């Protein structure tokens, strides 16, 4: 009785309720592990020749580190397969798989694998556990020539760790069109054979891109018939695309995100029609910039063939350029009619920036878009052009600095296969659709595009990722003033109408087009912190759908945060009053017991009356 009295009136009850209302550090750590918020970020530093693992749940505490070969010209971390899955019961190359491999290329190495030549290039590989840093196996092997492409592979069958064995397999494509496998073991060759003869696929396809010659080659890996077995695999050319280095130079290359979960293959429109997404896992986006000599030659041709500086471009637009017909001043049109197209106006600048979409299996160009972002003098002056880009589902978002307008332009492309009318899919009518996608037979996509303006310089782009892809997506921008901002995908939708929004468009969440993207302080994940020189933004999913884990890095700062693109609809906030909820539940239980006793007493009195 005394202990119960002290509990109620001596402060014990209040301290217990306070501990319930506020989560302790131990409880938060348990919650972070259970909900998948605690991650180990494995980061590679080429300058330091070192791998460092950081604990995101403990403010970036170093978990482990590993030194790499100090004489290597480059290092790469490889994990998973060509197509990673979000959830893998065996951990064979899934998004959260912890087994990795690091590659260190040695341009000149002596005494490699018994070789006595001092000019033999070599590759050092290490297979390790990303959570603990434990090295399973490592070796230095000779290389026939420079590496032009790295293709990760994982077996669909679970294999246990054996002595000097690694579950991660890498196919290396060399400059002399040869192929090597790391590790060079019988099991690794069987994994490559499995990828070549996989059911539902036409084989194992790779590609190479030579930035100097501008040649993009789509290749197929095949088994050779060599008797000695020294080169068991060979490359067969499927398609080739050439970017003339005299006209344009390659700036950047982007690929779709591996392991991204796509919640729906179509978009429901306001009139109940279906807009089908073009989902091609072999998509490659190549950004090129026109050379100063090419822009100079275009300007010279324009001046020689036309009396005015804009005659060449007016001729392309369909104007005769003679001046015999009177033209209205720029921007003048009839009341209620649209403004004249920009292509018919004077002083149209030649395109100087190009985004080309290529299928890496067939090698054909799917789409090409151009922008006039710089003059000949800007490119000749050596102004560095950086075009960060991210590919998410059927969306391609990229940003570039426009030297003409002195601001950042954000380009958005959305790829679609077509549309199904609202009456085209019923219980009695279904359109003919292919169940499998083939890059060799599929038609080119229908591309919708739009360009927006942003008042900040963009150094990196990213996008949020969730467990099932149900939450709305937010695109992340690293700005030149050392901030990380987020913009809702609805603001970047290329289908935003320029005129008045119709009711059907309102029902699907479309907003009227605005050329400038707003920067909202509430949509700034970095808040008051400065994240210096961000070069890359990556994200991964948690065990709950509402949360996305974002990591920004590239400079001296590393920034990690947790975002809720559609708010925390499946998670209680940290400041949730658990103590008040406990009091209410206890009061309800006591009240039910009292009512039950009073009801029983009433029944007894009524029975004796």
Image (cartoon, grey):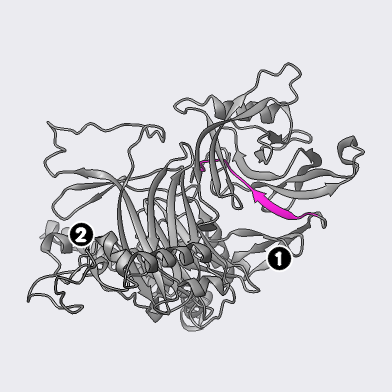
> Residue at the location (48% across, 51% down)?
257
How many numbered markers are drawn?
Answer: 2
Q: Is residue 70 visible?
A: yes
Name the mark on residue 269.
Answer: none
In the picture of the structure, the residue carrying the numbered disc 1 is 62
Extreme top residue here? 227
**Residue 336 figure quarter:** bottom left
Q: Secondary structure at mark 1?
A: strand
From the viewer's perspective, is 485 left or right of 168? left
Viewer-side residue, 259 vs 587: 259
Q: Cβ–Cβ below 8 Å for labels 2 and 1?
A: no
Q: Is residue 75 magenta?
A: yes
- Residue 56 placement (x, y as % from top left): 60, 65
Give whichever of discs 2 and 1 has the lower sequence position: 1
- Residue 12 placement (x, y as % from top left): 51, 78
Q: Is residue 169 visible?
A: no
In the picture of the structure, the residue carrying the numbered disc 2 is 508
**Residue 148 figure quarter:** top right
From the viewer's perspective, is 285 left or right of 520? right
Extreme left residue here? 335
Q: Main secondary structure of the magenta part?
A: loop
From the viewer's perspective, is 124 left or right of 448? right
In the rendered view, would you say 116 is above or below 452?
above
Spatial CA span between label 2 and label 1: 46 Å
Q: Is residue 242 magenta?
A: no
Viewer-side residue, 155 vs 194: 194
In the rendered view, would you say 258 is above or below 413?
above
In the rendered view, would you say 238 is above or below 79?
above
- Residue 386 placement (x, y as % from top left): 53, 67
- Residue 273 placement (x, y as % from top left): 17, 48
Check the picture and name the quadrant holding the C terminus: bottom left
Q: Which residues are magenta?
A: 72-84
């Amino acid at each position: 009785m005394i202990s119960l009295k002290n509990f109620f009136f001596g402060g014990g009850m209040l301290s217990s309720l306070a501990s319930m209302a506020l989560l302790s550090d131990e409880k938060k750590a348990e919650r972070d592990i259970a909900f998948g918020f605690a991650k180990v970020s494995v980061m590679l530093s080429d300058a330091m020749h070192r791998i460092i693992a950081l604990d995101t749940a403990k403010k970036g505490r170093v978990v482990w580190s590993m030194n790499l070969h100090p004489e290597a010209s480059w290092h790469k971390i490889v994990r998973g397969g060509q197509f990673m899955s979000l959830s893998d019961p065996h951990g064979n190359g899934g998004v959260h798989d912890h087994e990795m491999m690091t590659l260190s290329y040695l341009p000149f190495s002596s005494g490699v694998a018994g070789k006595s030549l001092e000019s033999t290039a070599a590759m050092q590989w290490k297979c390790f556990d990303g959570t603990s840093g434990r090295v399973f196996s490592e070796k230095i092997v000779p290389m026939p020539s420079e590496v032009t492409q790295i293709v990760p592979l994982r077996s669909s069958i679970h294999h246990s760790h054996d002595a000097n064995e690694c579950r991660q397999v890498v196919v290396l494509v060399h400059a002399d069109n040869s192929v090597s496998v790391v590790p060079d073991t019988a099991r690794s060759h069987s994994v490559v054979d499995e990828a070549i003869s996989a059911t539902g696929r036409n084989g194992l396809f790779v590609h190479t891109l030579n930035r100097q010659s501008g040649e993009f080659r789509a290749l197929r890996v095949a088994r050779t018939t060599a008797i000695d077995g020294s080169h068991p695999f060979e490359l067969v050319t499927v398609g080739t695309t050439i970017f003339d280095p005299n006209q344009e130079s390659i700036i950047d290359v982007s690929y779709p995100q591996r392991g991204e979960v796509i919640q729906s293959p179509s978009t429901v429109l306001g009139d109940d029609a279906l807009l089908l997404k073009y989902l091609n896992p072999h998509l490659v986006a190549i950004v090129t910039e026109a050379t100063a000599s090419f822009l100079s030659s275009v300007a010279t041709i324009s001046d020689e063939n036309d009396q005015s500086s804009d005659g060449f471009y007016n001729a392309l637009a369909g104007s005769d350029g003679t001046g015999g017909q009177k033209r209205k001043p720029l921007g003048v049109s009839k009341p209620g009619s649209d403004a004249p197209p920009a292509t018919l106006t004077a002083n149209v600048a030649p395109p100087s920036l190009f985004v080309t979409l290529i299928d890496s299996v067939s090698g054909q160009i799917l789409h090409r878009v151009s922008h006039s972002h710089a003059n000949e003098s800007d490119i000749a002056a050596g102004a560095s052009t950086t075009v960060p880009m991210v590919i998410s589902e059927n969306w391609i978002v990229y940003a570039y600095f426009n030297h003409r307008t002195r601001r950042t332009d954000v380009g958005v492309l959305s790829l679609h296969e077509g549309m199904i009318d609202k009456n085209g899919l019923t219980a009695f009518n279904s359109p003919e659709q292919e169940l499998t996608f083939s890059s060799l037979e599929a038609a080119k996509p229908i591309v919708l595009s739009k360009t927006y303006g942003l008042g900040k310089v963009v150094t990196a782009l990213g996008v949020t990722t969730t467990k099932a892809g149900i939450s709305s997506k937010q695109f992340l921008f690293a700005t030149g003033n050392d901030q990380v901002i987020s913009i809702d995908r609805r603001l970047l939708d290329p289908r935003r109408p320029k005129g008045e929004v119709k009711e059907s468009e309102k029902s699907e969440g479309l907003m009227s087009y605005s050329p400038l993207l707003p920067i909202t302080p509430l949509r700034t994940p970095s808040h008051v912190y400065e994240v210096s020189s961000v070069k890359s933004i990556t994200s991964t999913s948690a065990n709950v759908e509402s949360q996305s884990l974002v990591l920004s890095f590239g400079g001296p700062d590393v920034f990690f945060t947790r975002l809720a693109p559609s708010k925390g609809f499946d998670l209680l906030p940290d400041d949730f009053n658990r103590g008040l909820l406990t009091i209410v539940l206890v009061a309800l239980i006591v009240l039910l017991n009292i009512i039950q006793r009073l009801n029983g007493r009433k029944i007894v009195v009524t029975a004796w009356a």
